[in-house]
């Protein structure tokens, strides 16, 4: 394949196996998410419990993520990801067992999601930090874009398959998801461990918090990841989609699957474009613009009662979020030394996890307080307010023209 081809990075064997395992694992988890959300809401018809799905995953994640970053810098990241995929497979098997038993209570589901959140805490930093070691630096931008686009392809297919399979009941969804997770675990296990800078510093609070100190010392990195935290924290409408599908749009689990698919579809289309036409100029403006688009889409989503308009809004939200994710990921990877990349990725994962799972909990609580549609509109408006505030708080990020490593390359060429 030509080196200018966005798919040329697949010639790197380690990256190809890593990508395959990530796609299958994500596909399985997305299928499970649809089944869990619909099953819990069907059993309880309680918006608060939809928020609890996010909290059950976020609470252990928050407690474990910083130590997990230290683990990712001290031990082989491939082995960590393999073990986490195996744990997620166990979660799938337990969900399958619960569905097969016909239980009518929801707390066992929340307990299993705590285990899932624990595995995700260790998997996140290792997965993010591992990618940069799988390809040469000149191929990293394309690898990030292709990894993101492939991830969102799985995000597209997973909810759709989950919704279609749920017609046959949750057992079908959980059984296939468990099988996919098993294959993902095997693929990651047979991947050759990539070289990485090893850190043998003992696990003290000083070493564990090294990633946080690094982020706080870099305004560009801090501004990028904190923008995602606060913007998506308020715009976490995804958790409310089961209720939106059931009570407002009046569609079943298949319709819910399509709604859950739409953000991934928008993100995938956007990331495929980025693989061939990467952002090189007006980096800061692109990032803030993506978050603003996400906020506008959320506001419109909360006001519509039409299924097709809701799909379009979610598609737009996914595309806007993808631009922000792409810029943030490259900023973090290029600015971070490999020896502490796991710990910095852990801090990044805290912000991302808080914006997603904690955002889902916030949405559930807010919806229970002010109503479903008003809660979604409020979240989108808050996202737009945060975007404007961060432009003022981090002007160096908002005015950034090129990525820092491009600036260094241009300076060296000028000499």
Image (spheres, helix red, strand yellow):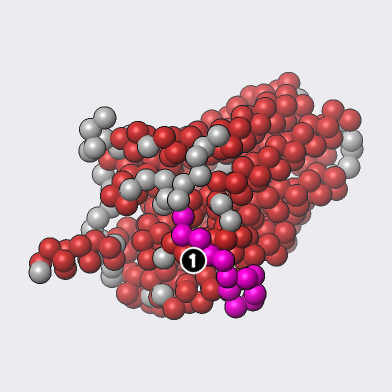
Q: State the residue at coordinates (65%, 46%).
A: 84
The secondary structure that dominates the magenta segment is loop
Question: Callout 1: helix, strand or loop?
Answer: helix
Residue bearing mark 1: 340
Image-based side of 131 in relation to 62, left or right: left
Q: Verify whether residue 199 appears in magenta.
A: yes
Q: State the residue at coordinates (43%, 39%).
A: 15
Tell me which segment is drawn in magenta.
Answer: 196-207
Work out which residue is located at the far left of the displayed protein and give it. 415
Please tell me which residue lies in front, 175 or 245. Answer: 175
Q: Verify whether residue 209 appears in magenta.
A: no
Image-based side of 273 in relation to 255, left or right: left
Quick check: can you spot residue 34? no
Quick check: can you spot residue 66? yes
Residue 86 pos. (x, y %)? 68, 40
Residue 299 vs 101, above or below: the answer is below
Residue 363 vs 15, above or below: the answer is below
Q: Residue 233 appears in which quarter of the rendering?
A: bottom right
Residue 41 pos. (x, y %)? 76, 42
Residue 99 pos. (x, y %)? 82, 31
């Amino acid at each position: 394949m030509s080196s200018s081809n966005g798919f040329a990075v697949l010639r790197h064997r380690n990256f190809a196996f890593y990508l395959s395992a990530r796609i299958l694992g994500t596909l399985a988890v997305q299928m499970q998410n649809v089944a869990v959300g619909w099953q819990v809401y069907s059993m309880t018809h309680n918006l608060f419990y939809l928020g609890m799905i996010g909290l059950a995953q976020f609470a252990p994640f928050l407690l474990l993520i910083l130590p997990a970053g230290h683990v990712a810098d001290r031990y082989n990241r491939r082995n960590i990801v393999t073990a986490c995929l195996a744990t997620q497979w166990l979660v799938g098997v337990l969900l399958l067992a619960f569905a097969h038993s016909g239980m009518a209570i929801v707390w066992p589901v929340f307990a299993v999601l705590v285990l899932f959140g624990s595995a995700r805490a260790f998997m996140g930093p290792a997965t993010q930090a591992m990618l940069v070691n799988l390809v040469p630096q000149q191929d990293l931008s394309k690898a990030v874009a292709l990894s993101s686009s492939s991830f969102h392809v799985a995000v597209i297919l997973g909810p759709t398959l989950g919704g279609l399979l749920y017609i046959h009941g949750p057992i079908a969804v959980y059984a296939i998801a468990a099988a996919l997770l098993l294959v993902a675990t095997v693929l990651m296990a047979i991947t050759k461990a990539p070289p990485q800078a090893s850190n043998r510093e003992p696990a003290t609070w000083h070493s564990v918090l090294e990633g946080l100190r690094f982020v706080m010392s870099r305004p560009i990195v801090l501004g990028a990841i904190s923008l995602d935290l606060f913007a998506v924290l308020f715009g976490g409408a995804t958790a409310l989609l089961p209720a939106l599908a059931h009570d407002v749009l009046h569609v079943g689990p298949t319709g819910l699957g399509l709604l859950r698919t739409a953000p991934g579809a928008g993100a995938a289309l956007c990331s495929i474009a980025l693989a061939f036409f990467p952002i090189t100029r007006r980096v800061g403006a692109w990032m803030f613009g993506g978050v603003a688009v996400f906020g506008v889409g959320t506001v419109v989503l909360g006001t519509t009662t039409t299924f097709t308009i809701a799909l379009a809004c979610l598609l737009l939200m996914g595309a806007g979020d993808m631009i922000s994710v792409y810029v943030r990921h490259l900023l973090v990877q290029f600015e971070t030394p490999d020896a502490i990349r796991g710990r910095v990725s852990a801090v990044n994962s805290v912000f991302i996890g808080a914006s997603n799972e904690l955002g889902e909990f916030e949405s559930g609580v807010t919806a229970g307080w002010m109503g479903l549609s008003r809660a979604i509109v409020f979240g989108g408006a808050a996202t737009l307010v945060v975007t404007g505030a961060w432009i003022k708080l981090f002007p160096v990020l908002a005015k950034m023209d090129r990525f820092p490593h491009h600036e260094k390359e241009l300076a060296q060429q000028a000499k």
